[in-house]
Amino acid sequence: MKKVLAFALIAVSLLAGCGEKKGEAPKVAFQSTDLTGASFAKDFALTDHTGKPRTMADFKGKVVVMFFGYTQCPDVCPTTMAEMTEVLKQLGPQADQVQVLFVTVDPERDTQKLLAEYVPAFDKRFIGLYGTPEQTAAVAKEFKVMYNKVPGSTKDGYTVDHTAASYVFDKEGKLRLLLRSGQGVAPAVHDLKLLLG
């Protein structure tokens, strides 16, 4: 076991040095999952909580954090949104170069009015996005997001199981990172600072 561990450590140190020239500082790595070069999550066409049509191009020049959820989510969604509020606080003035997007996977219940009340309550800069059930399905497919209604005791009392992670795009609108649910604020702050330069 000790030999395997020693070889693993040697391999990691060799890989860490690949591509570096003498005198160059080592490349700083992201703490979240690096998706640079991924061929999905290229664009969307949805409506924001003010009624304005939106695509990824609207946010060029900003680092975009995109989360899929729904307003009646009991735990993951409000926790993620609260964490993003804290991330922006810790970024200080740089926070104005970040756009947080909340995309609902419950278009039947999450109306424009409800999104307009829910999303900016976390931070006035946050934007809620919605579409028809068909538009929602198309965007979820493009972004490889899974969601599924779980019946409740009443017709409207269902919950929605969904992918619990956030995508991060650089200032050019290219997918760069996956922020895992539950990883906390510190890795997000670290990685967004790298993308903000």
Image (cartoon, rainbow, N blue to C red):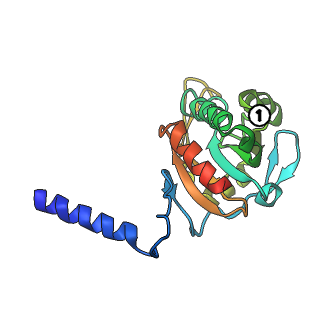
Up the image or down, 190 lies above or below 89; here it is below
Q: Which residue is mark 1?
A: 115
User: Amino acid under label 1?
Assistant: Leu
Q: Residue at 79% across / 55% down in the picture?
A: 59
Position in image of residue 150 (x %, y %): 53, 36
What is the residue that sits farthest to the front in this orientation? Answer: 23
Determine the residue located farthest toward the top in the rendered image. 153
The residue drawn where x is 58% and y is 35% is 80
Residue 53 at x, y = what percent? 86, 51
Tell me the quarter of the picture where residue 152 sits: top right
The quadrant of the rendering that contains the N terminus is bottom left
- Residue 81, by quadrant, is top right
Visible residue check, residue 1: no
In the rendered view, does 130 fall on the left or right side of 70? right
Q: Residue at x 60, y 65 (%)?
A: 40
Circle 1 sits in a helix, a strand or a loop, which is it? helix
Residue 149's x, y, as percent?
57, 39
- 100 or 118: nearer the eye? 100
Residue 57 visible: yes
Give the residue at x 62% y 61%: 175
Front-most of residues 137 and 31: 31
